Amino acid sequence: MQLASTIRGVSYRFASVKEVLAKANPPKSGDDLAQISARDAVERVAARAVLANMTMRELRENPVVPYEQDELTRIVEDELDEQAFRAIAHLTVGQFREWLLDIDTSGGTLRAVAPGLTPEMAAAVCKLMSNFDLMTVGAKCEVVVRANSTLGLPGRLSSRCQPNHPTDDVEGILASMREGLSYGCGDAVIGVNPATDTAESTAEILTAIDDVLKRNGCPTQHCVLSHITVQMKALALGCPMDLMFQSVAGTEQANKAFGIDIKLLDEAWELMKAKGSTRGPNRMYFETGQGSALSSAAHHGADQVTIEARAYGLSRRYKPFLVNTVVGFIGPEYLENGPQISRAALEDHFMGKLLGLPMGCDACFTYHATMSQDELESLKVLLGTAGCTYLMSLPVGDDIMLNYQSTSYHDIPTLRRLVHKRPTPEFDAWLDAKGIWRGDGPGPKFGDVEAIR
């Protein structure tokens, strides 16, 4: 395997595949913080030249965290589909990029290949692609899943209704939820980030949301994003639970910092199959974000794009209904400005979809990042065009509990009209019956919370 290239008469040599992957990455403040990024643009080009000539087989044989050291590496390797892998094993990363972009490479072909890809392969080709490339392939990847409704069909753009409340006041949560539903938001999930991480509070919120949804015949899913162990206790209390949530990262060590491991995730998955209230078969919800492993010093010297892809490699073990990259939430230490946040969103969406996941994105930024509202709105349009499965939605795009900027209830119907997409089929029919949305435009009850009893 050749780990050197010459640019303008200067030879660049790299110590490992991991170093090549890191230095081929577009500029990211997190990689700079970890001191693993390219020294300059020329070294970045040299690393990409090496990466373009690396084969898929060589990437499989050189994971960024060794098999012996990491349970996530082991499950990716042990569960890889050998037949699917053989179809692309001989390709270089450069050839794989050209094949992905080929007009004759269909969504069905990409679905067939996905089980044979390791996260490192998805990350590697991502580094050779422009934003336009990422959008083009992301739009081709179709991942259809089902819980109480069907997510990911062509021509659809869904949203998570996020009715957070700073004190978990149930009436406040329900009021915000009803507003979101009245604007046509929430077909992916009604998902609440709790302020109080207890089984009793989780059960109370879920029970109240479930009552409103059932009373109105609303075809969607609900979830309270407490820690997975708390949700398991809430389920034992007998509450309804359509989806079980957990934040995940791309290394065993980083997941330990989240208080989880594969054994616990396996247990939770089995519990949801036995006691969850969704029809399924997809019952899990995962959130990720570039930089989470670095924030706990658990990145093993690897770049944040590659570690993020590894989180998707873990997620697909559980056939989730939702996977969401909270792209700008972790802060400017990892993604410092609008261009870096936008690039990361397109990278994450592409890698997740390529690996076979129903990928959504929280297009967002924290108040100490350098990103404007205009840049955030542009990112939403890019994601909608790229085939993003779902976005967030919350009152005026300003989360009063988590204190960050995201997508508003008003943005979702605007974006759907702009990119000519609709919500899930079941939710679309419900909106029509309620008079909230008719055909391609607002109905007589659009924005009317009284339409939701």
Image (cartoon, helix red, strand yellow):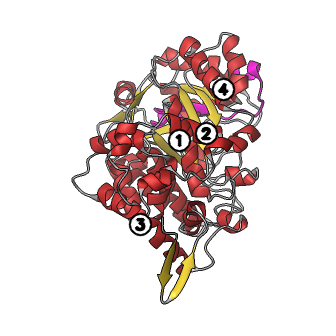
Q: Nearer the viewer, mark 2 or mark 1?
A: 2
Q: Nearer the viewer, mark 1 or mark 3?
A: 3
Say which residue appears at 57% left-offset and 75% top-offset: 13
Residue identified by numbered label 3 = 53
Residue identified by numbered label 1 = 313
Residue identified by numbered label 2 = 72
In the image, is residue 167 above or below residue 299?
above
Say which residue appears at 41% left-offset and 42% top-offset: 116
Q: Whole-percent x and y of residue 394?
A: 58, 42
Work out whether mark 3 precedes mark 2 in sequence or the reverse, and give the earlier one.
3
Q: Residues within 10 Å of mark 2 (few under 14, many from 20)?
A: many
Q: Secondary structure at mark 2?
A: helix
Inspect this view and state whether residue 188 appears. yes
Work out whether mark 1 precedes mark 4 in sequence or the reverse, and give the earlier one.
4
Per the rendered image, the range of residues in magenta is 180-202
Residue identified by numbered label 4 = 263
Q: Secondary structure at mark 3?
A: loop
In the image, is residue 407 above or below residue 208?
below
Badge 4 amino acid: Lys
Residue closer to the observer: 242 or 439: 242
Direction bottom: furthest residue: 9
Work out whether mark 2 precedes mark 1 in sequence or the reverse, and give the earlier one.
2
Q: Whole-percent x and y of residue 112?
A: 32, 39
Say which residue appears at 50% left-offset and 31% top-offset: 320
Badge 2 amino acid: Leu
C-alpha separation, residue under disc 4 versus residue under disc 3: 37 Å
Q: Residues within 10 Å of mark 3 (few under 14, many from 20)?
A: some
